[in-house]
Amino acid sequence: MQQRILSSQLAEYVGQTVCLKGWLHRLRQLGEVNFLILRDRHGIAQAVLSAEAATTLSHVPVESIVCVSGRVVQESQAPGGYELHDPTVEVINPSAAPPPLEINKKKIKASLPFFLDHAVIGYRHLERRAIFQIASGIMQGFRQTLNAADFTEIQTPKLVGTSTESGANVYAVEHFGQTAYLAQSPQFYKQIMVGVFERVYEVGPVFRAEKHSTTRHINEYVSMDVELGFIHDHFDVMAVVTQVITGILEYLSADYSQQLALLKVDMPIIGYDIQHPIFPYIHFADAQQMLAEQFGMKDAIGAPDLTPEHERLLGKWAQQKYQSDFLFVVGYPMQKRPFYTHPDPDRPDYSNSFDLLFRGLELITGGQRLHRYEDYITAIEKMGHSLESYAHYLEAFQYGMPPHGGFAIGLERFVMQLLKLDNIRLATLFPRDIHRLVP
Amino acid sequence: MQQRILSSQLAEYVGQTVCLKGWLHRLRQLGEVNFLILRDRHGIAQAVLSAEAATTLSHVPVESIVCVSGRVVQESQAPGGYELHDPTVEVINPSAAPPPLEINKKKIKASLPFFLDHAVIGYRHLERRAIFQIASGIMQGFRQTLNAADFTEIQTPKLVGTSTESGANVYAVEHFGQTAYLAQSPQFYKQIMVGVFERVYEVGPVFRAEKHSTTRHINEYVSMDVELGFIHDHFDVMAVVTQVITGILEYLSADYSQQLALLKVDMPIIGYDIQHPIFPYIHFADAQQMLAEQFGMKDAIGAPDLTPEHERLLGKWAQQKYQSDFLFVVGYPMQKRPFYTHPDPDRPDYSNSFDLLFRGLELITGGQRLHRYEDYITAIEKMGHSLESYAHYLEAFQYGMPPHGGFAIGLERFVMQLLKLDNIRLATLFPRDIHRLVP
C-alpha cells in the first residue's frame, strides 16, 4: 500500500503517483469533465474522473472514506493549484446514508438548533472546522506566552466541597452522601497556588447553572485563568493581559493564516508604543463622565456599573481616539466586585480592578486581590458569611501571601468576538444550556 | 523601589546591590553568623545577618513575605553559590502565625491526611512543589509532541446527557429538571472529532464515582487523551504512545533538571532502534504462556486479564530481557475490553488493543476502535443496550469514519510512577476521594 500524503503536500509531488486519503467531500459531474473532491485534515484536493468512473462513484455516498491514487498535475483552476489525473479510487469505509447537513457547500444553511443536533458531523464543514482550529490555536498561544513568562500550569479540582465563591447558580453533585459542587471558577485555587508557584495559569472547564439562555451565555465553558504574585497593583496584571492577548494574536497570525483567511477574520487593531503593544485605559469614573458629555448618556453618571450600551460606545470611542480594538476600563466601584477585590488605596470606593473591552464587548475581567489575612476576615464578615466555610482559602493567607492579581478569559467568548459570530454556541463544540445536554 | 531579581539570577549580579522578594523560608541563628533564607519561585537564597538583625527578625514568623536588598557575594557554601551581604530586610506581608507544617525542613514528617488538610501551604515545601512543577512539564511535553505531529487540541463537555459509556460509577448532576452526568472520559467525543480533525488530543478532568479508596485511585483526575484516524491497526497508535512518552521525558530532562535532581528521579530506561526509541511488546497470550513457564504462574493461562502480580513480573521480565522500563502488552481478550474495541481480524477473540506497563504497572490503555457503522450496531445490541441512547455517537459513524484508535494517560498516575510516590494523592494537588472534598 502506498504511503499517504496530505492535500497540502501535492506541490511536492508533481509528476509522481501519490495516494490521498480522506472523505469523499463532493462529486462534480459536468459531463465530459468530472471531479472527485477529497477532504482531509489540511483541506481539499480534486481528482479528474472519466465519465465512466464518475458514474460508478455516483453510487458512493458523500462522506465515505476513500483512498485516491493518481498522478499529480499542476492546474491553476484546481483547489490549491494541483490535481490528480488518472485516479484509482478505493472506498475504505462507505458512508451509510447522505448526511443531514450539506457540509460540502460553501455555507451551511441549517438553523442553529438543527446544526447543533447534528454537530457531530456538522463540524466537518470547512468553515465550521476552522472555528475550532482557531480555538485550539488560542489555547496554544495563551500557554506559550505564559510559559515563556515563567508561569506554571495547574489543574485544580472541579468537584469542590463548598459553594462559597458566589453561592448562586451552582451545580450540586451527590458525592457519597455529601453534597459537592461543580467549580464556577478556579479563583480560590489559583490564588492559593500563587503562594506556591508565584505565577500560575489553568485552562479548564467551569460550570454556571444560570437559568437564562442568551446568545452570550452557556452553562459550561472553558476558562483560561491567570494569577500572579509580587505585583505593584492591577496595572502589572494588565501588562500580562496585553502580553497574553498580543501573544495569542501573533500565534494565530503565524500558524493559522489559512483558517483566518477562510473565515475572513478582521484581525484586531493594536496600538504600539514604539516596540511594545499597548492597550489604552480609562478610569471607570472618567468613562461615565465622558459617556454623559460626549454621548449624552446621562444615566451613566453615578451608576455602579456600565451597561452593554455604555460598553459599546466606549469601544467606538477607543477605536476613534486610539485606533484600538481593545480598551481597559479600570477602577470599577467596589460594590460590584467580588469580596476578594483590592480597593484603590487612594479612593477606597473604587477598586484596583479592570475589564478589558474588545470591540465594545467585555472580554476579560481581572484585578488586584486582597493579600492580607486580616483584610479577608473583614471582607468575609462584611458579607455576613461564616469564616468556617472559607477555612482552607483563609489558611493560605494566614501564612504570607504576596500582593497578587489575575484575570480570566472565556475561550468561547474570545473566539466569538474575534470571528464576529452571533452566538456563543457557534464557538462551543458541544454547548450546554437549559435546553441542551446532547450531543 | 529596586527591581526584583530571582534567587537563580544572583550570579549575574556579583558586587551589585540587588533586591530579592519572596517568603522568609528560615532564620538560622548561629550566634556570630546568622542567615536569612529566602524562597522564591526559582529556589532559595541566603543573606548573612548581624546578630542584631537576626534578633530583630526572630520576631517575624516564617512564611512572611519579605524584600531583602543586599550586595551579591560569591560564596561556595551558600545555596546556589552566592549570598547577600549587609542586607536590609523589609517585611511586605507578615505571616499571622507559624505554619502547621515545617515546610522549611528537608522532609515533611506529617501524615498524609494531615498534609492534605494543610496542602494549601504544604505545597510551598521545595520537594512537594517540585512534584507539581514536573506535572506541569509533563502536560507541556505531551502537548508539544502532539502539536508537532499535527494534532488539534479539543475541549469536550464534562456535563453529558447520557451515562452510556460504562453506566456504573457515574456522578449525577441536576440540570434544570433533567439528569446530567459528569463525563468519565472524553472517549466518545474524541472519536467523533477524529471525523473532523483526524488527530485530536485533550487534557482535562474526568470523574469516576468509585467507592473504593486505594493508593492508586481518586474520584477526579486529569486525563491526557489522544485519538487519531487513518491508522492501519493498533501498532500505529503504539507508535504515537512511544513518541509521546519519549517526548515528555525529553522535555523534562531539558527543562526540569533541577526538579528531577531535587527529587532524585530515576529517569526511565528506553531502548533505541538506531535512532528511534522503541518500547518492546508481547502478545497477551504469549505473556500468559511465559508467566506460566518462566515464573510458575499457572493461574495466568486462560485468564481473561492480567493480575497486578502478573504485570509486576512482566515489568521485571522486560527490564531483564530488553533493558526497558516500558512494555506493551497487546491483544487483550475482547471480553475484557469496551464495546468499541476493534477485534484482531485474525483471532477475533483477541483485540487490537494494548496496555503500556511502566515498571510493571499499567500506565496507559489504548487500542484500535471499531470504525464501521454496522459493527457499532452489532456491538451495542450485543450488550443489550438501546441504540437510541447512543444516537449522537452513532451518527458520527453513519457518515464515514476512518480506521482509528487512541489512548489515555492518567496525569497523576504518570507522576506517581515516574517519581515512585507511594500514593496517588501525593501527585494530585487537591485529591477527591470518598473521604475528601476539601481543600
Image (cartoon, coloured by chain):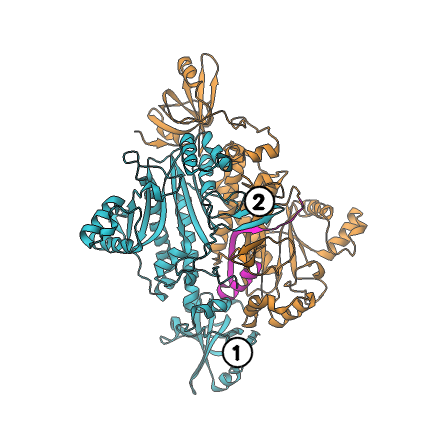
Chain colours: A orange, B cyan
- Depicted A350 relative to depicted A223: above or below: below
Can you tell which mark lies on residue A79?
none
Q: Which residue lies furthest to the left in this view?
A: B293
Q: Which sits in the foreground, B258 or A296? A: B258
- Callout 1: helix, strand or loop? loop
Give the amino acid at mark 2.
Answer: Glu
- Depicted A236 relative to depicted B82: above or below: above
Q: Which chain carries label 2?
A: A
Q: Position of residue B300 (x, y in %)?
A: 25, 50
The boundaries of the magenta stretch are A187-212
In the rendered image, the quadrant that contains the N terminus of chain A is: top left
Q: Name the residue under label 1.
A: B61
Q: Which chain carries label 1?
A: B
- Callout 2: helix, strand or loop? helix
Q: Name the residue under label 2.
A: A412
Q: Where is residue B140 in the image (x, y as percent from the top left)?
A: 43, 52
**Residue at the spot x=35%, y=52% of the render?**
B363
Report which quarter residue A16 is drawn in. top left
Q: Which sits in the foreground, A168 or A79? A: A168
Q: Which sits in the foreground, B395 or A341? A: B395
Q: Position of residue B400 (x, y in %)?
A: 44, 29
Q: Seen in the image, is B305 located left or right of residue A147?
A: left
Give the amino acid at mark 1.
Answer: Pro
Q: Position of residue A435 (x, y in %)?
A: 62, 41
Is A193 included in the stretch rendered in magenta?
Answer: yes
Residues indicated by labels 2 and 1 sit on the same polypeptide chain:
no
- Depicted A195 relative to depicted B251: above or below: below
